[in-house]
Amino acid sequence: MMNKIIKIIASVMPNPIKILLYRLVGYKIGKNVKIGFMTLILANKAKIGDNVKIGSLNVFKLNKLNIGRNSTIRSLNMMLGSKNLKVGKRVQIVGPFTFMNLAEDIELDDGCGIGSHSIFYTHGVYLPYTEGHPRKFGKIYLGKKVWSPSHVIFLPGVNIGEDSIISVGSVVNNSFPKNSLISGSPAKLISKADRLKKTMNKEELEKRKREILGDFIRNSYLQDAKTELGKYKLEIIKNNRRYLIGLRIDERINSKDYDEIIILGESLKNSKNKNISLFDLKKRKMKLGGEMGKTFSKHLETYGEYFN
């Protein structure tokens, strides 16, 4: 009973105190974890990895909660039941209003993305079983990098293979192999998911990186800034501070001429300067060197670009 009271109190505490209280009741909480106001975690056991972000007004009332590092669960979601929720690394539960019924386990493997108003039912029973009515209980599993946008319903026992895509509003009542494009109510296999991908070569990659650079000018943060867009770089002057965002490191550029430099696509090994932010597209790692780098990383999220 005392542990439950501590967990309830923790939900309204500032983040540092919240983390301390959760650790006090035995939860394993990693580094740089952020849990929003009035998010209630009532689990018998919980393990939350490094850099996990959980928004406000979520409810987790379940047996075991396991969230892998670099994952995000935004606000206003509900996970209820007697079994376990396992969330892999770098999973996004976008919310709001995702509901998970945990009469059986639910597992979202690494890199999954779940849109708003999603519903997971691990049991289907209401009318009397002894009168011939159906009953089904079953774990729901989504493989690595499954993307499920908003208003998708998952029914008991569903297993979705890795790299699959599910269309908006689908009702998924059967399992599908990896690399599936799934759509409909009930959901059916439309084709292989990778037919939606464009073959990438060096020229296409450069084109897409320049598009990301150019689109950043429309960021609300830059509304009162002076910007100059070149083929491979964007120069910004804001509040008498100078910034450079480029697609490659140019040895002719003096880092002292800028308050911050951001490079998209370079290896993290290419700079140790504190004012340089690097986004390594091959290893999917980033180094942030200032506030503009943080702003740019949020911009990259709108393109589905992720970095650890």
Image (tube, rainbow, N blue to C red):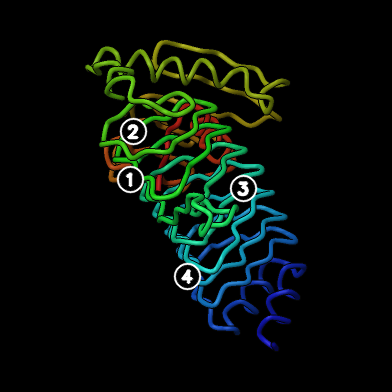
Q: CA distance from mark 1 to mark 3?
A: 21 Å
Element marked by disc 1: loop
For image coordinates 37% across by 26% down, the residue present is 188
Amino acid type of the residue that numbered disc 2 sits on in the rendered structure: Ser
Residue 266, placed above or below residue 283: above
Element marked by disc 4: strand
For image coordinates 46% across by 33% down, the residue present is 262
- Residue 75 horizontal/vertical position (percent): 67, 48
Q: Residue 74's mark? A: 3
User: Considering only order in the chain, which callout, 1 or 2, is on the residue closer to the N terminus?
Assistant: 1
Label 4 with label 1: CB-CB less than 8 Å? no
How many numbered marks, from 0 up? 4
- Find disc 1 in the rendering and name its residue: 143
Q: Residues within 10 Å of mark 4 (few under 14, many from 20)?
A: some
Q: Nearer the viewer, mark 4 or mark 2?
A: 2
Q: CA distance from mark 4 to mark 3?
A: 18 Å
Residue 299, placed above or below residue 97: above
User: Considering only order in the chain, which callout, 3 or 1, is on the residue closer to the N terminus?
Assistant: 3
**Which quadrant, please, contains the N terminus?**
bottom right
- Find disc 2 in the rendering and name its residue: 164
